[in-house]
Image (spheres, rainbow, N blue to C red):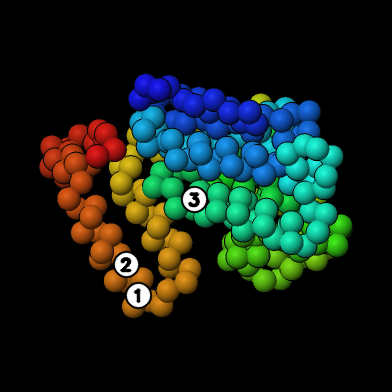
């Protein structure tokens, strides 16, 4: 495989749009419901991104939905993927959770373009981005309570921090749809846009991030994640350690020169 040739997958499509990696969940006949295979392939795609020269990641869904949740039929064979507690536990700890953690640790900025239903693990995936852009017809749903289950995919951690305990409790315990406009008003997502503007807006945002100082942006992702768990003193120490890395980057050198020369910086991701 050449440096710019994206690997092929069964349940998703990965393509390059310049420095932006566009990853499309591709099971439209199932509203992009995610069997374990999809998250294994998602993990493999994340590992491939640095070698492809990608500097930002944009995730969306094919067809009418972003992702309608975990596929209860699993990878096939007719058996329910959550038929027993042990089976569900293994699926989460061996497949879904490691992939969500890999996405959180990705050293590239991430945008999600939510084109329809984002439910269950699909809601977790949509909200795990640095910037979540949603079509006005889209919605977010923590559907677990409706089938007697509890949220997974990091939802309890994310929602409590993004919108506070009261609204997180509402989403999880009532199991009602949160429309894109309401999600924006809550601060759950970056922006709600007209349906026709979703991909142009999300792609433009991803392209803007891809043109930025990649190493600094990656360190910002790490710093923000850690700050949610650290004391103020620990956050200051993390910032100093990250700044030491960023200062030595080629992008920082370019940024300094551009400032002195009073011109726009041209970052190359180094």
Judging by the rendered image, the residue that carries numbered circle 2 is: 238
- Residue 230 in the image: state x and y as whole percent: 42, 74
**Vertical relation: 178 (above or below) 262:** below
Q: Name the residue tied to disc 3.
A: 102
Residue nearer the viewer, 77 or 218: 77
Rendered residue at 74%/29% (across/down)? 28
Residues marked 2 and 1 touching at CB (< 8 Å): yes
Comes first in the chain, label 2 or label 3: 3
Query: Compared to 64, does 242 lie above or below?
Result: below
Q: Quadrant of residue 109?
A: top left
- The residue sitting at 19% across, 53% down in the picture is 247
Closer to the camera, 261 or 87?
87
Per the image, the residue denoted by label 1 is 234
Please tell me which residue lies in front, 74 or 251.
74
Q: Nearer the viewer, mark 2 or mark 3?
A: 3
Residue at screen point 44% across, 53% down: 105
Could you tell me if residue 172 is visible in this image? no
């Amino acid at each position: 495989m050449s440096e710019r040739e994206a690997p092929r997958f069964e349940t998703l499509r990965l393509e390059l749009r310049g420095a932006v990696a566009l990853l499309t969940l591709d099971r439209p006949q199932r509203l992009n419901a995610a069997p374990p295979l999809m998250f294994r392939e998602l993990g493999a795609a994340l590992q491939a991104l640095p070698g492809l020269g990608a500097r930002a990641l944009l995730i969306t869904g094919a067809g009418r939905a972003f992702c309608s949740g975990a596929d209860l039929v699993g990878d096939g064979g007719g058996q329910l993927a959550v038929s027993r507690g042990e089976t569900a536990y293994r699926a989460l700890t061996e497949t879904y959770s490691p992939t969500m953690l890999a996405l959180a640790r990705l050293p590239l900025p991430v945008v999600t373009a939510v084109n329809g239903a984002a439910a269950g693990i699909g809601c977790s995936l949509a909200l795990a981005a640095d910037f979540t852009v949603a079509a006005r017809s889209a919605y977010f749903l923590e559907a677990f309570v409706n089938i007697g289950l509890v949220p997974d995919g990091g939802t309890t951690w994310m929602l409590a921090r993004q919108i506070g305990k009261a609204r997180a409790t509402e989403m999880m315990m009532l199991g009602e749809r949160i429309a894109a406009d309401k999600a924006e008003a809550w601060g759950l997502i970056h922006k709600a846009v007209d349906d026709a503007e979703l991909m142009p807006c999300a792609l433009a945002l991803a392209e803007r991030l891809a043109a930025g100082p990649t190493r600094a942006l990656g360190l910002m992702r790490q710093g923000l994640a850690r700050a949610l768990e650290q004391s103020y003193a620990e956050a200051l120490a993390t910032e100093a350690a990250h700044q030491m890395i960023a200062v030595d980057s080629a992008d920082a050198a370019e940024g300094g020169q551009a400032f002195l020369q009073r011109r726009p910086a041209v970052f190359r991701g180094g």
